[in-house]
Each structure stands twice: as structure tokens, then as C-alpha cells.
Image (tube, grey):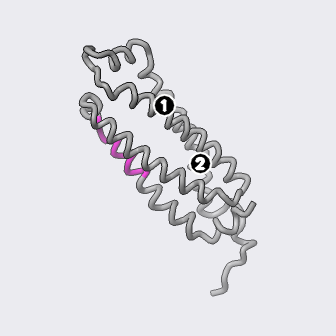
């Protein structure tokens, strides 16, 4: 079977359509996550979680909540950068996408590990958290090898 020409492989087609959809949805998901996290900074909630002696106090709440907002804001900026790199077909996009997925995977595991150190948070861990971990693992397992091996990726991201 003849090798497909690089010209035929160029462009945002094939499996890259799914990448485009995911990249467009990622900022929306992160904005929702940030909005959900900001609820913990409401004065009453923040005071309950971070004031020694209150019913839900734990010394890790404040750093965990601040870190979650900071990390999710960073991921939001990163997802915006990935969108730019993707649609301008920059050569660095595949490596940046791999780094972003790896960072997202580390963040999901670190967040769950940190939250499990807080008894109130550990008690609320449920199927949503496990689904989030599963999605991150599956996405990395599929897309990282794709970005590394795909001829279309290598032919498309050349700018």
C-alpha cells in the first residue's frame, strides 16, 4: 500500500476533529470548575473552613482551596494557549498538548490526594472524583500516543 502524501494528511481533519472539540470544551469546563471553587471563598464558608475551632476547620483547607483556584486558573490559561497553537497549526502544539495532559493528570491525582488528607473532604469523595480521574487517565492514554505517532499530526503542525 502506498504511503499517503504529506499534503493529503495536512489539515484539521480525521481524529483532529475530536481534539478540536475537546480543546473548545476544555475552557468551558475549567470556567465551571473555577466558578464552583469560588463558592468556598464566600465569607461564611471560608470562615467555617479556615477558622481554628470551627466545626469544619482543618489547617489544609485554606492552602488547598487557594491552590485549586490558582491551578485551575493556570489550566484555563493553558487551554487558551492550546487553542491558539492548535488553530494556527504551530509546530509546538503536540508537545504542548502532551504537557497539558500530563499536567492535568498530575493535578487530578494531587488534588484528590490532598483532599483525602482532610476528613470532611475525604467523606465526600464519590463517583464524580473517580470519573474525573478515569477521564484524565483515558484521555492521556489515548491522545499522548496519538500526538507522538500520528502522521497527520506531524504533517499538520508545521508553522
Q: Quadrant of residue 73?
A: top right
Write down the residue under mark 2.
23
Residue found at the very far top of the displayed protein: 44
Q: Which secondary structure dominates the residues rendered in magenta? A: helix
Relative to residue 14, is residue 60 depicted above or below? above
**Residue 148 got which mark?**
none
Q: Residues within 10 Å of mark 1 (few under 14, many from 20)?
A: some
| Residue placed most toward the observer, 8 or 141 | 141
**Residue 69 got which mark?**
1
Q: Is residue 53 left or right of residue 20?
A: left
Return the disc, 1 or 2, that comes first in the chain's sequence: 2
> In the image, what residue occupies the spot 75% across and 72% down?
7
Looking at the rendering, the stretch of residues picked out in magenta corresponds to 125-136
The image position of residue 51, as x and y in percent, is 32, 15
User: Where the C terminus falls, by quadrant?
Assistant: bottom right
Q: Is residue 55 left or right of residue 32?
A: left
| Circle 2: element type | helix
| Circle 1: element type | helix
Mark 1 vs 2: CB contact within 8 A: no
In magenta segment, residue 12:
no
C-alpha gap between disc 1 and disc 2: 20 Å
Q: Quadrant of residue 78?
A: top right
Q: Quadrant of residue 60?
A: top left
| Residue placed most toward the observer, 5 or 157 | 157
User: Where the N terminus falls, by quadrant?
Assistant: bottom right
Q: Nearer the viewer, mark 1 or mark 2?
A: 1
> In the image, what residue occupies the spot 57% across and 43% down?
25
Relative to residue 96, is residue 46 depicted above or below? above
The image position of residue 134, as x and y in percent, is 38, 51
The image position of residue 109, as x and y in percent, is 37, 46
The image position of residue 8, as x and y in percent, is 72, 72
> In the image, what residue occupies the spot 67% across and 53% down?
86
Amino acid at each position: 500500500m502506498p504511503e499517503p502524501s504529506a499534503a493529503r494528511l495536512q489539515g484539521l481533519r480525521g481524529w483532529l476533529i475530536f481534539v478540536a472539540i475537546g480543546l473548545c470544551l476544555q475552557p468551558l469546563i475549567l470556567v465551571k470548575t473555577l466558578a464552583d471553587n469560588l463558592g468556598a471563598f464566600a465569607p461564611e464558608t471560608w470562615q467555617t473552613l479556615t477558622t481554628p475551632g470551627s466545626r469544619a476547620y482543618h489547617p489544609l483547607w485554606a492552602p488547598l482551596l487557594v491552590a485549586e483556584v490558582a491551578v485551575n486558573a493556570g489550566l484555563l490559561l493553558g487551554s487558551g494557549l492550546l487553542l491558539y497553537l492548535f488553530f494556527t497549526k504551530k509546530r509546538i502544539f503536540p508537545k504542548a498538548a502532551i504537557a497539558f495532559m500530563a499536567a492535568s493528570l498530575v493535578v487530578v491525582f494531587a488534588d484528590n490526594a490532598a483532599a483525602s488528607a482532610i476528613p470532611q473532604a475525604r467523606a465526600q469523595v464519590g463517583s464524580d472524583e473517580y470519573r474525573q480521574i478515569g477521564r484524565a487517565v483515558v484521555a492521556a492514554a489515548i491522545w499522548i500516543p496519538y500526538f507522538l505517532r500520528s502522521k497527520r499530526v506531524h504533517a499538520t503542525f508545521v508553522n
